Amino acid sequence: MARYTGARCRLCRREGMKLFLKGERCYTDACAFERRSYPPGQHGPVQLRIKLSDYGIRLREKQKVKRIYGISEKQMQKYYEMAINMAGPSGHNLLQLLERRLDNVVYRLGFAPSRTQARQMVNHGFFTVNGRPVDIPSYIVKPGDVIELKEKYRSNSQIQENLQVRVQRGIPAWLELDAENFKGVVKSLPSREDITIPIQESYIIEFYSR
């Protein structure tokens, strides 16, 4: 599956907000968005004065979510189909499915500083779910699932540092982290209040249902 391999800071600038794609760098003055908050390209500052159409607004919202979670268009359409066939608000269902991806949960628990690195760690078999090895980043966790770092990776100083930083910044209410034992538990499904990323999910549903 094709993945974006270009400069990630360009994506934040294109969407006009920090997407936190580069871990700790995004929290420092080295963040490119802090220095150039206009869209990338020769005519970047000019683009700020261009008014988007209704279609453009919904397209940008969809692209923003894809970039935050690092998924392809095909995956996004799949999650949309799943969301509209679930009970409850389709927009919330969509965000809930994205939040429950294993790579996102690994990131939320603090094992990795970014979703990109979390995806790599899952791909390389760093984690087990309920005691069974899982190397599929798109694996959807459910309440009661236990995500645990394998024993041989627990001495990694970078992972230990990542966990300390995450504990300081806080863990989402729907997750529980046991940093000493390198494990996390999915306590419940994420509520809309737990998803603090500024997303207008209704625009995404409208985009695909047009």
Image: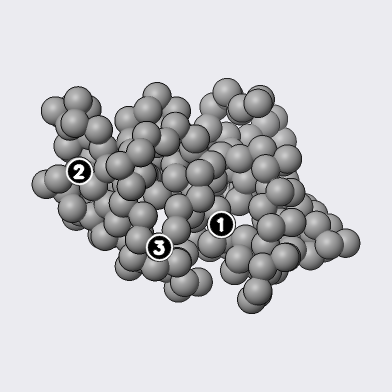
The amino acid pointed to by label 1 is Leu
Residue 201, image x, y percentages: 64, 65
Name the kind of residue labelled 2 in the image.
Phe
Query: Tag 1's secondary structure?
Result: helix
Q: Residue at x 57, y 34 (%)?
A: 10
Q: Amino acid at mark 3?
A: Pro
Cα distance in 3D space between marks 2 and 3: 18 Å
Provide residue 114's location: percent of width, then percent of height. 39, 39
What is the secondary structure assignment of the residue under circle 3?
Answer: loop
Residue 118, x across and y down, in percent: 40, 36
Mark 2 or 1 closer to N-term?
Answer: 1
Q: CA distance from mark 2 to mark 1?
A: 24 Å
Q: Is residue 165 placed above or below 151 in the rendered structure? A: below
Residue receiving disc 1: 97
The front one of 44 and 158 is 158
Picture disc at residue 107:
none
Quickly name the residue at label 3: 143
**For this view, does 192 lie left or right of residue 152?**
right
Which residue is located at x 49 percent, y 55 percent? Answer: 99
Q: Position of residue 48 (x, y in %)?
A: 68, 50
Indicate which disc, 1 or 3, sits on the residue closer to the N terminus: 1
Residue at 42% x, 36% y is 134
Of callouts 2 and 3, the N-terminal one: 3
Q: Does the CB distance between marks 1 and 3 fall below 8 Å?
A: no
Pick the quarter of the image with the C terminus. bottom right
**Circle 3 Cα neighbour tier, 10 Å, few/some/many (<14 / 14–19 / ≥20):** some
Examine the image and state in which quarter residue 208 appears.
bottom right
Q: Nearer the viewer, mark 2 or mark 3?
A: 3
- In the rendered image of this protein, does residue 91 appear above or below residue 208? below
> In the image, what residue occupies the spot 30% across and 56% down?
185
Residue count near mark 1 (Cα–Cα under 10 Å), binned few <14, some 14–19, many ≥20: some
